[in-house]
Image: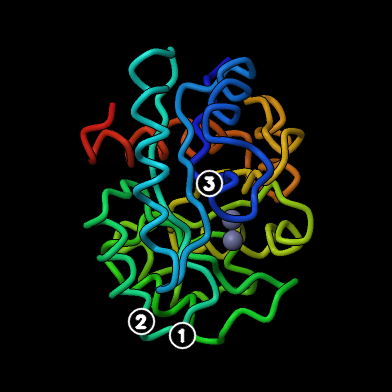
Amino acid sequence: MGKRIDLHTHSIFSDGELLPSEIARRASVLGHRAVAITDHVDASNVDCVGRVINAVLDIRDNWDIEIIPGAEITHVPAEIIPKLARKAKELGAEIIVVHGETLVEPVIEGTNWSAVNCPDVDVLAHPGLITHEEARVAKENNIFLEISARKGHSLGNGHVVKTALEVGADLVVDTDTHAPEDLITYQMAEKIALGAGLPVKELKTVLKDNPTHILKEKGIF
Ligand SMILES: [Zn+2]
Ligand SMILES: [Zn+2]
């Protein structure tokens, strides 16, 4: 059995219920190797990355789990995504997620396109009815598409997996955790990926190799 790597969670620094340390502890108990804390940001609160980093420093030095500060750029005009991604990185965010065009929220049209064209972005979360062209560009720019464990966002998972497989884009399974019960085990992540139509032979690539690759490229692993 593999160890979970979850690159998309929310703490009390945006709309999550848990302190970073509680996310870390619960993830550790569920068998995670690493978890990124990617609170929602726009231009008004991107400096909350600094608060996450302060929280993370204590945990990552003392516990047997890698906690990674990040940010999820959320509901901003598509044209400013690159600027905010850069800003979040400068403030110390190591994983940049973009809140994609989910089926269940009025995300601004063009968000997926802007995200896949921004090399500072690591994961396009819940990209809904992503097009083949967007998925192709994501692949070119080394941006991973998310299979979401979150209710609502997960309605698009089948389409996301099908489109990614057709163009060879890379996938990850993330939870978008907001509450304690949202974190999942490796086995549950496998079931969610299979339920989205991912072939069994792709499971290890998507659940283990892809997130490991992202973190190795950044020198975190
Ligand atoms: Zn999101
Ligand atoms: Zn999220």
The residue singled out by tag 1 in the image is 77
Q: Which residue is drawn at 47% across and 59% down?
A: 72
Is 52 left or right of 162, judged from the image as shown?
A: left
Instruction: Give the CA distance from mark 1 to mark 3.
Output: 21 Å
The one of 19 and 162 positioned closer to us in this rendering: 19
Q: Do the residues labelled 1 and 2 touch (CB within 8 Å)?
A: yes
Q: Residue at x 28, y 26 (%)?
A: 221
- Horizontal relation, residue 177 to residue 143: left or right: right
Badge 2 local density, few (<14 within 10 Å), some, or many (20+)?
A: some
Q: What residue type is labelled 1?
A: Pro
Does the beta carbon at disc 3 come under 8 Å from ligand 2? yes
Q: Position of residue 167 (x, y in %)?
A: 45, 64
- Work out whether mark 1 precedes mark 3 in sequence or the reverse, and give the earlier one: 3
Checking the image for residue 80, the label placed there is: 2
Q: Which of marks 2 and 3 is nearer the N terminus?
A: 3
Q: Identify the residue at image location x=63%, y=43%.
A: 175
Say the numbered circle drawn on residue 8.
3
Q: Where is residue 64 in the image (x, y as percent from the top left)?
A: 43, 12
Ligand 2 in which quarter? bottom right
